[in-house]
Each structure stands twice: as C-alpha cells, then as structure tokens.
Image: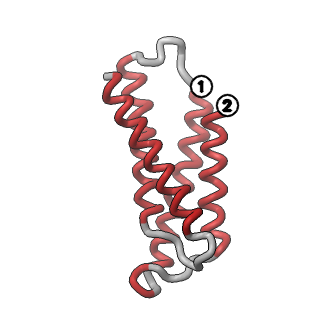
C-alpha cells in the first residue's frame, strides 16, 4: 500500500505543479491554460485517494496530519477546481480555447494554490 500511496503523492504534486505552473505561465496573457483545470482535478482526486489509502492501511501510525488540516485543504482544493472549471469555460469562448478570463478569477486560482501549498508545508 505504501507504493500506491507514494504514486498518488507524485500525482498530487504533479497536479499542483500543473496548476501553479499554468497560472504563472499565463500571468501576462489574458487567458489561462486549459490544463490548469485538469491539474486541479488530478490533485484533488489524488489527495482524496491518498487520505483513503493512508487511513485504510494505517500508514499514518502516529496519527498523521489532523483531519482539520485535511478538511481545510480539501475545501480549498474544491474551490480551486471549481474556479479552474469556470475559467476553462470562460476561456473556451475565445480563439482555440485561449480566450480572456476575468483577472480576479485567474489570480484567485493562483493565490489559493499558494495558500494550499503553504498550509501543507507549515501546518
């Protein structure tokens, strides 16, 4: 089970890397890369599966992270995924799916992603 947990952890990290990288790469453009939604969905699903695998196989013998932390991270991840979906829909109205996205929407995705990473590291 530890191998499965570590594979899910890699997918989780890759998902957030896609979200943050897609946001940073598109800061100067009016649009947002479509992959941001897919990265957020990947990170969300992998994170939920990680918690399930760890709880099921008792990988967190010392109690692991608090469920409050996991709940906060899950809530933020859900919000990021919904915002990325809205941005994807908004951007699909432009040329080849790269249309303009509201700046507040785009920057909310980037800021919440950073908040989620900071919570993971410092809580």
Q: Is residue 24 above or below residue 64?
A: below
Mark 2 = which residue? 123
Q: Position of residue 80 (x, y in %)?
A: 55, 56
**Could you tell me which residue is drawn at 53 percent across and 49 percent down?**
77
- Report the number of numbered marks: 2
Image check: 102 left or right of 77? right
Circle 2 crowding by C-alpha within 10 Å: few under 14, some 14–19, many from 20: few
Q: Position of residue 118 (x, y in %)?
A: 66, 41
**Could you tell me which residue is drawn at 57 percent across and 25 percent down?**
65
Image check: 9 left or right of 22? left
Q: Quadrant of the C terminus?
A: top right
The type of colouring in the image is: secondary structure
**Could you tell me which residue is drawn at 53 percent across and 16 percent down?**
63
Q: Is residue 67 above or below residue 27?
A: above
Image check: 112 left or right of 42? right
Q: Kindly report the distance in space between the C-alpha atoms of the residues bearing marks 2 and 1.
A: 9 Å
Q: Quadrant of residue 59?
A: top left
Confirm or deny contact between disc 2 and disc 1 (CB under 8 A).
Answer: yes
At mark 2, the secondary structure is: loop
Q: Position of residue 12 (x, y in %)?
A: 44, 42
Image check: 105 left or right of 3? right
Residue found at the far bottom of this picture: 95
Q: Quadrant of residue 38?
A: bottom left
Label 2 vs 1, first from the N-terminus: 1
Mark 1 = which residue? 66
Q: Quadrant of residue 79?
A: bottom right
Q: Nearer the viewer, residue 64 or 97?
A: 97
Q: Position of residue 92 (x, y in %)?
A: 43, 79
Q: Is residue 35 above or below residue 2?
A: below
**Could you tell me which residue is drawn at 53 percent across and 58 percent down?**
21
Q: Quadrant of the N terminus?
A: top left
Q: Which mark is residue 11?
A: none
């Amino acid at each position: 089970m530890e191998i499965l947990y570590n594979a899910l952890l890699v997918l989780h990290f890759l998902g957030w890397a896609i979200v943050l990288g897609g946001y940073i790469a598109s800061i100067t453009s009016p649009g947002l890369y479509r992959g941001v939604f897919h990265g957020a969905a990947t990170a969300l699903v992998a994170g939920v599966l990680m918690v399930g695998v760890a709880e099921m196989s008792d990988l967190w013998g010392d109690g692991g992270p608090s469920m409050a932390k996991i709940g906060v991270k899950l809530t933020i991840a859900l919000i990021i995924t919904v915002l990325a979906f809205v941005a994807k829909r908004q951007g699909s109205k432009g040329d080849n799916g790269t249309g303009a996205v509201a700046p507040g929407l785009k920057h909310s995705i980037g800021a919440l992603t950073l908040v989620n990473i900071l919570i993971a590291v410092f809580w």
